[in-house]
Amino acid sequence: MVIKMKEHFYEAEMVKQEIAENKRLSKRGFLDTRDISMELNTLLNADGSCIFTYGKTKIIAGVKILIDKPYPDNPDEGSISIGIELSPMSDPSFGTGPPDETSIELSRVVDRALRESKGIDWKKLCIKEGKFVWMVYVDMYIMNNDGNLFDACEYAALAAMKNARFPKIELTEDTCTIVKGEYENKVVEFTNDPLLFTFVKIDDKIILDPELVEEAASNARFSIAITNDKKMVAIQKGAEGSFKIDEIKDIVSIALKNYDVVHKKLMNAMKKK
Amino acid sequence: MVKNEEWYFDQKGKRFDGRGQFEQRPINLKVGVIDRADGSAYVEWGQNKAVAAVYGPREMLPKHMANPNKATIRYFYRMAPFSVPDRKNPKPGRREIEISKVSGEALSRAAELEQFPNTAIDVFVTILDANAGTRITALLAASLALADAGIPMKDLVSGTSVGKAGGKLISDLSKHEEDAPDAVDLPIAMLPNSDEVVLMQMDGPLTEKEFNEILEVARKSCKEIKDMQVKVLKERFKDDFNGD
């Protein structure tokens, strides 16, 4: 997310000075990610939820699993839907009103990372072919914006989905209804845990997991999603700057190397709750 | 054209539409197609057809959107309702808004926006006919229209789309290939003179090795397409301004 320069002008200048000396304001290394913590399933009306913190960035993800009609061209496949609300309570630059291009880009990139990993078997989300399938809705609210909403939202959505339970249903020949308040002992299965890695470029140097002021100092952004079998499944280059081909190749290999570290961090946070 | 067939390569390694592995569809460029516009262009890329118009630099309205340091490019990528097999709702969808955002950012890198503070440069692109690869077709048209409008530019934006289908890396996916179960689509736009990547998106799984290989193919194609763009612009301005 590129925030208008004037809002963080002085902080951005400080970031640039530090980067020139190969340091970050936060004392992190260029390729270090922030700490992850989460609380799972604390919202009782959601089928799954995750209050996710990534450094000081905080996100609430809620899952609702509903019955829907399948698309005619895929009668035996369910689907997921990702929605992200840039809540005006989380940042002075976020406004009210319908989603703007920033939030549309954010939710589409997160959606693409999760969907293109093909880690969910869509056929397992089928209840009855041609009639009823599961739709997994993941809606996220930004609670505090301290940068890198792309990665934070993707991790939060993944954690929330992996811990969401399917509601109990009553199925007859023509009807399918959810039994309120009762759950099956079944969660959304994600087989290859895609993780998103977002880099920004500040004066020709590239850093991973930017904070808000670092985003303000940056002029180009690169996000890449990696699965646990070390395949790249989604890419988005953003903002007005550019990357050289060799820089992109470096970013890819850094992201691949970082996968295990971040995956472990995320799984540990998930176990701790 | 062959449709609904589950094969992507024949025994000789040719693709379903007779193209070679890294062969692009024919590209046809035209500059100056809309009289009223400050700059305009029309691009055909295989079946894809895009027309672009540039207005500006002009006053930014609403005024609070103006940037006191430079011009702002506002890019509007829109698909006509009749451009796809089903009727597309003319209301801009989330996909169109996202493509507009990243394409506008790509053009912003190429244009010398600092010369026109506080102004807006509006770029309107309409897709008339679509068969995979429309965002790059649109961007080529927009880049030519920007040059046609006389806006100073560091470089032209040229681009291509590469990817994978039927188990092999390929250039310039058509719709049939884009719908393959293992399809990877990787649209990329570059400033070919400085080798800078200004737009890149990808969906679908690729290994690092495949990615590096296909990037080199894309880099080469971008240079070829830039030569075509330069040629058509030279053609447009070969007479002096009074001779037109």
Image: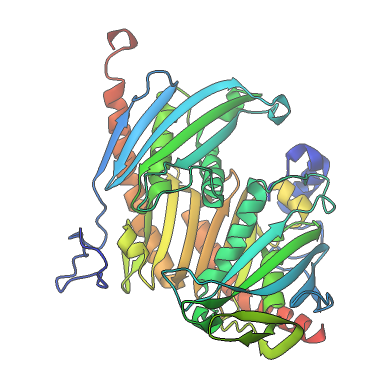
Residue A267, given in percent of the width and then of the height, sits at 72, 83
Residue A153, by quadrant, is bottom right
Q: Which residue: 83% across, 54% down? A: A90
Answer with left or right where residue A77 lies relative to residue B2. Answer: right
Residue A236, by quadrant, is bottom right
Query: Residue B107 versus residue A181: which sits nearer the camera?
Result: A181
Residue A119, given in percent of the width and then of the height, sits at 54, 79
Answer with left or right where residue B122 lies relative to residue B119. Answer: left
Residue B207, by quadrant, is bottom left
Q: Which residue: 54% across, 70% down? A: A115
Q: Residue furthest left?
A: B12
Tell me if residue A204 can be seen.
Answer: no
Residue A217, given in percent of the width and then of the height, sits at 72, 46
Query: Residue A184 versus residue A98: which sits nearer the camera?
Result: A184
Query: Residue A253 versus residue A181: which sits nearer the camera?
Result: A181
Query: Residue A115 versus residue A148: which sits nearer the camera?
Result: A115
Answer with left or right where residue B204 lies relative to residue A84. Answer: left
Residue A206, given in percent of the width and then of the height, sits at 63, 57
Q: Which residue: 70% across, 77% down? A: A159
